Image: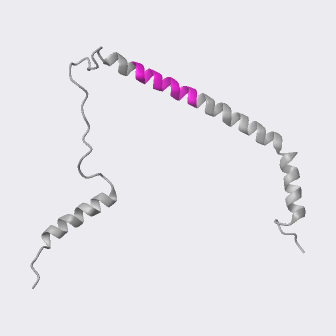
Amino acid sequence: MAKSLRSKSKLQAKSVKRKGEFAKYADERSKRLAEKLAKETAKQEAEKKSKQNKEQETMDLDGQDVDGGKSKKVSTSGWRDSNSQRYKQRQLKNKSKKKTLKF
């Protein structure tokens, strides 16, 4: 009869393998991933700094753009572009068309 994968003997054998045979592969993999992440974060930081430097170059001492205009404000009012908002907007339009007097 076959042993279950949840049996104590199978679990102990797997834990021994994890600690002994496969430990060096797991450690090497985690080191490679850590190095890769460190390179990526350094790259992102460098891009962020260069972007900030470009923005500062375009600004005058007064805080205005070189063109002389102030930064453009972004409007946050109005309908958002999500499915639920579009559904609500359609429902409101339909309600205004269906208005009738009830007797």
| Location of residue 39 by image quarter | top right
85 to 99, vertically: above or below: above
Residue plotted at (23% across, 61% down):
89
| Location of residue 87 by image quarter | bottom left
The reply, left or right, for residue 101 in relation to residue 25 is: left
| Magenta highlight range | 41-53
Q: Residue 88 at what x, y percent from top left?
A: 27, 63
Q: Quadrant of the N terminus?
A: bottom right
| Location of residue 101 by image quarter | bottom left
99 to 39, vertically: above or below: below
Q: Is residue 46 within the magenta segment?
A: yes
Q: Quadrant of the C terminus?
A: bottom left
Residue plotted at (32% across, 18% down):
58
Question: Which residue in the rendered view is the most extreme toward the bottom?
Answer: 103
Q: Residue 11 at what x, y percent from top left?
A: 85, 60
Q: Residue 52 at what x, y percent from top left?
A: 41, 22
Comparing 48 with 77, the one in front is 77
Residue plotted at (18% across, 64% down):
93
4 to 37, vertically: above or below: below
